[in-house]
Amino acid sequence: MHHIFYTHGLGGSLHAQPEIEEVFEPLGYTIMRVEVPYHSNIVELAAKLATMTFGDFCSLISHTADGIVERARALALEEYAVIGDSLGGFISVVAAQRDARISHCILLACSGDICNAILNLNHLIPGLGHLAGMFNLAGNGGLRIQAHKAIAGQSDFQTEFERVNTFRPERLARLHRLLILGDRGDPLAPEVTCQHFARGVKGGKVIMAYNEGRHHPIGKAALRKYAVPFLQNKPLSTGDRVRTLFASVRRFFSADS
């Protein structure tokens, strides 16, 4: 596996987080960047956010995830990894739940919980949560209200949400390997929410690489320390190494007997 699809976050661009190439390309990985719709310029994005319904938001995630899968299929890739930052993380995990060829999924500053992130948008840009989708009468109260309703299965856009509902057990079971890297106090992806999502994935791993109390990119040092060995199927901590050692010992004695 030497191909990585990287998807940027809300307000980002194809040139966001150059650390991805700086960390992974020297190790032989090919990076393919994914542009999220409406991100060609800040004016287009602001206008779209003002009128975007919760259904539009879910469809954006769904269609972009499908674009990753289709692009990998066109390249005839037998196996690849996805890395997504914030909004790009939701797109990446939806893609990983749809394509069995995705062997590793890494979420950066992303909890995997779409509704929780929308409910906390104000922590990203003050007022954004209240304004997003409010300038479209069809939005029925905006993104936050509809996300809250979706949790109870009562959103006016429930059909669109269910297409990207990452918590569906059968979808969680399709994730081969999951790593979430974040900040312990990130209001958009707090540790407790990340852990809640990862518990549904066998072997899912959550590492809070920072304790700065904010939503921010994951830097090169953390990517090298955690993301690189994760992609190489190596232990990420002393505890992991000990468990791997004991598992090897058990297999040895089982084979010997």
Image (cartoon, helix red, strand yellow):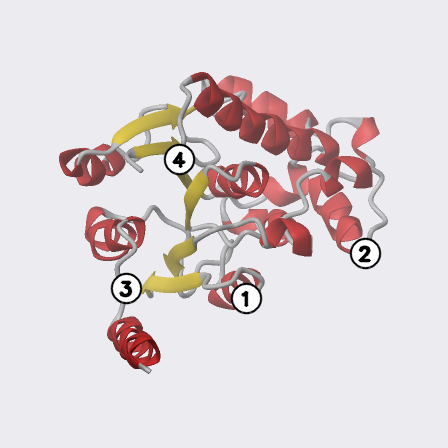
| Residue at 28 percent of width and 34 percent of height | 2
Residue on which disc 3 sits: 236
Residue 199: percent from the left, percent from the top? 54, 66
Image quadrant in which you'd find residue 57 = top right
Residue on which disc 1 sits: 199
Residue on which disc 2 sits: 152
Name the quarter where the N terminus is drawn.
top left
Q: CA distance from mark 4 to mark 2?
A: 36 Å
On screen, 44 above or below 253?
A: above
Camera-side mark, 3 or 2: 3
Camera-side mark, 1 or 4: 4
> Pointer 4 and pointer 3: residues touching (CB < 8 Å)?
no
> Type of residue at label 1?
Arg
Camera-side mark, 1 or 2: 1
In the image, 103 versus 85, the foreground residue is 103
| Residue at 49 percent of width and 27 percent of height | 68
